[in-house]
Amino acid sequence: MKRTLALTSAVATITLTATSATAAPTAGAAPPSSVAASRAEQVHAAMTRDQRIGQLFMVATPADSVSPGLRSVVSRQHVGNVILMGRSTAGADHIRSVTTGVQRLTEPTAVTARVPAFVSADQEGGNVQVLRGPGYSTMPTALTQGRWTTATLRSQARSWGLQLSRSGVNTNLAPVLDTVPTTDKSTNEPIGRWDREYGPLTTTVTTKGGAVRSGMSGAGVATTVKHFPGLGRVRGNTDTTSGVTDTVTTSTSGVLRPFADAVDAGTPFVMMSSAYYSRIDASQPALFSPTVIGTILRQRMGFDGIVMTDDVGNAKQLAAWTPGQRATKFISAGGDMVLTARTDSLPAMVSAVRSKAASDPAFRAKVDAAALRVLRAKDQAGMLGTRLTPTGTFTPYFAERLQGWLGKPVTRTWDTATIRSLQWRIGATTTGRRDAASMRALQDHLGISRDGATRWNSRTVAQVQRYLNTQL
């Protein structure tokens, strides 16, 4: 199925020597020949087993900072994806410095084979808008968004998406495609209580959710439709309650239609619900169910992108399983990416996956397949091309990448037109000259401290280079 993630990149073809880990590649499923292999397959073949496993996790850091815990799990467990969690009112400039710091963790070859991270946030609107402050619009609830015209919503979503992508957030954990019937709204704790649904009808959810997905994708932000197969008919919130069960939804219910439409439209991520569905698979929550993931989502709907969990680190619904079991059961069921809000639970999860992969060939094959799906999505997002090395020096390739980001003709020269365009983007006076005022504005835009420089120095240029690696 074609993936339509609209991130662009002017990058050279990747080579194995540019991405290989310091350790020898781990034997796995043999890739095609180097001539026929895709970039994702080449990177996958060059990764160690631990690096492949690391791509299957998305771990939290506070929205305002790169935590010591995140630094540890990225360096030691090779974690390949990050979620900005909590709330931030610091604004886009500060978040830009955080996301640049996150991607800096993936620069060493031995960590993630230099594969950048999907950096995500819950930016739905209303009560669920993690990133606020200067540079971010105040987003209304999904219920309000659902009353707008489709064209207006698509346009607004593109604007919100640009705010995310320009601050280095390349993945939005939205839109919510749960349909909450009017009769259930007052008792629906996870969605209806907070007006997170676009409306009470599947036609509205399909259309408006599609407008958000289209607008975000057009801004270069990957979308994550959630929570499959739907949380609109439950009462409790799986984050805070155990035994949450949907007793109504079947494998052919209409509430699945918005998800099927999003799959057809090319959403790269589908987030699973952690609820039970007694009329589909009463024995286990949806994220552990081969019936829900394999039969309905993969086979019937034809989804070949990334299946991810909701937070499994703190969810009361999953308290009966150890952290390691949560990860291995999800991957065994056909899932790809485990999201946890707790960095302290990550080592146990990775250890369990590593151990099971070492002893169980069938599970090992699922790990390899999941890692390849993640890498294919990153390739579609332009994330497997050659990264800028943050040398702090002006090179033709740096000028090319900067001009591409600015939407200017690529001349590979540091000319007046490029300087003016950059000054306009960062809110400086467009003089076309590299001066002290521009330097201050650029450092503010990058979210780094001012150092009194009167010309663009190597420290700031290196930070621009790192930032451009978040704009692949």
Image (tube, grey):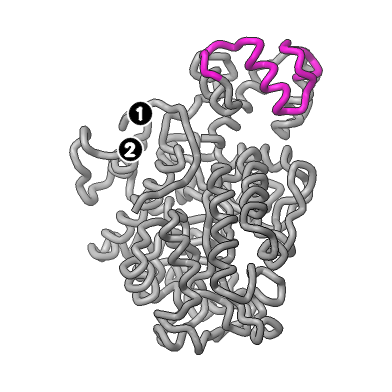
**Residue 377, placed above or below residue 447:** below
Is disc 1 placed on a helix, strand or loop? loop
**Residue 465, placed above or below residue 303:** above
Residue at the location (58% across, 26% down)?
A: 407
Is 220 or 25 nearer to us in this picture? 220
Is 32 or 253 nearer to us in this picture? 253
Task: Indicate yes or no whether the magenta region holds residue 419.
Answer: yes
Task: Indicate yes or no whether the magenta region holds residue 225.
Answer: no
Is 224 or 322 nearer to us in this picture? 224
Residue 286 horizontal/vertical position (percent): 45, 76
Residue 301 horizontal/vertical position (percent): 36, 67
**Residue 328, placed above or below residue 169:** below
Residue 122 horizontal/vertical position (percent): 63, 58
Residue at the location (51% across, 47% down)?
A: 118
Residue 456 horizontal/vertical position (percent): 70, 16
- For label 2, count other residues whose C-alpha is less than 10 Å away and answer few (under 14), some (14-19) or many (20+): many
Q: Which residues are magenta?
A: 409-438
Q: Which residue is mark 1?
A: 13
Q: Which residue is mark 2?
A: 39
* Mark 1 or mark 2, earlier in chain: 1
Is the residue under label 2 in contact with that under label 1 (CB below 8 Å)? yes
Amino acid found under the numbered disc labelled 2: Arg
